Amino acid sequence: MYQTPPQTRAVPVNVNRQPSDNASAKVNGNALNDEQIYQWINELVTGTNREKALLELGKKREQYDDLALVLWNSFGVITVLLEEIISVYPFLDPPNLSASTSNRVCNALALLQCVASNVQTRSLFLKANLPLYLYPFLSTNARQRSFEYLRLTSLGVIGALVKNDTPEVINFLLTTEIVPLCLNIMEISSELSKTVAIFILQKILLDDQGLNYICTTFERFHTVATVLAKMIEQLAALTVSGANGKPVTGQGQASSNSSGRLLKHVVRCYMRLSDNIEARKALANILPEPLRDGTFSSILQDDIATKRCLVQLLANINE
Ligand code: TRP
């Protein structure tokens, strides 16, 4: 039971733009030649104005592809970033994190995200186990904005790792139990954090080893399926209230777009689970009704790929 090797099927992957990733603005310049970068790094490591240095270096991230190399190889930089992160731990439990402290550590996290994104530093980043320092942030449950922002930015770092996933990344994440952390965020966090968390889960599922990991025990499969089902319930409730003729304001529009985005990921996660024979049998009984009865047909109207994915999912479980 639950050990059957999964069939693989190519599932279209939606590579989301991460919240703080600004790749499009990059000019592929050479950070090595920017004197200012060295001044800010110097300020970061030895100076008195570390907060400003974090902010300014964060801005440079948008300009240079190779900033990660400079950060990784400059003496003391990674140590300072870890120091910034660890200094926040005492405020996590009981939750007591000011907006400015959260902002400051998020600027440090943004620099780590840069290191996680770069193909030359990613592997070093993993080998040093640096993602583990973010797990205390991902484990928080407080709903205040300062915590939301902290979770979202931390997820952004993990998102950057899986965006260009390699077996090494997935393997790292599986051995460090990120899945339950993502599941918790999918339950308690804001829509944006939910989207990044489910994106990470989807990337793990798309990996054969990841699918095996989750379907190894019924309990794991069931935890994942339960959280997905809750998301479907929430999305269905939103869809129904939208269909009741409430005026669609600017805000309503935005939230219907983002529910579409969430739905897309949920459908793909279910679909991928159905590649596993045992999971497929279980899904035949527990797949939420709104996915079967056309509740989402208007949301999916223009999303042919997701519609096709849903059709395939239903075909799989009805086999
Ligand atoms: N230690 C738990 C396990 O290995 C971790 C876990 C909890 C988990 N919930 C999960 C893993 C859901 C995968 C899916 O089972």
Image (cartoon, rainbow, N blue to C red):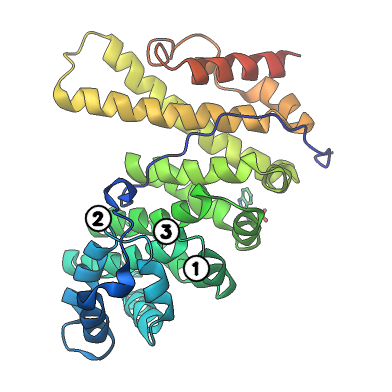
Mark 2 element type: loop
Q: Nearer the viewer, mark 3 or mark 2?
A: 3
Q: Position of residue 247 (x, y in %)?
A: 16, 13
Q: Is residue 123 left or right of residue 239?
A: right
Mark 3 element type: helix
- Marked residue nearer the N-terminal end (3 or 1): 1
Mark 1 element type: loop
Q: CA distance from mark 3 to mark 1?
A: 13 Å
Up-down: is 300 above or below 154? above
Give, as a three-letter code, the residue at label 2.
Gln
Q: Position of residue 156 (x, y in %)?
A: 39, 54
Give, as a three-letter code, the residue at label 3.
Val
- Marked residue nearer the N-terminal end (3 or 2): 2
Task: Give the number of the disc on residue 121.
Answer: 1
Task: Give the number of the disc on residue 165.
Answer: none
Q: Residue furthest bottom?
A: 46
Give, as a three-letter code, the residue at label 1.
Thr
Q: Nearer the viewer, mark 3 or mark 1?
A: 1
Front residue of 126 and 262: 126
Front residue of 48 and 120: 120
Task: Give the number of the disc on residue 157.
Answer: 3
Q: Position of residue 193 (x, y in %)?
A: 37, 46
Q: Which residue is mark 2?
A: 144
Identity of the residue drawn at 66% across and 44% down:
207
Front residue of 252 and 122: 122
How packed mark 1 is, by other alpha carbons closer than 10 Å (few <14, some 14-19, many 20 or more), is some
Identity of the residue drawn at 66% across and 33% down:
273
Identity of the residue drawn at 25% across and 82% down:
44
Do the residues under discs 3 and 1 have CB atoms within 8 angstroms? no
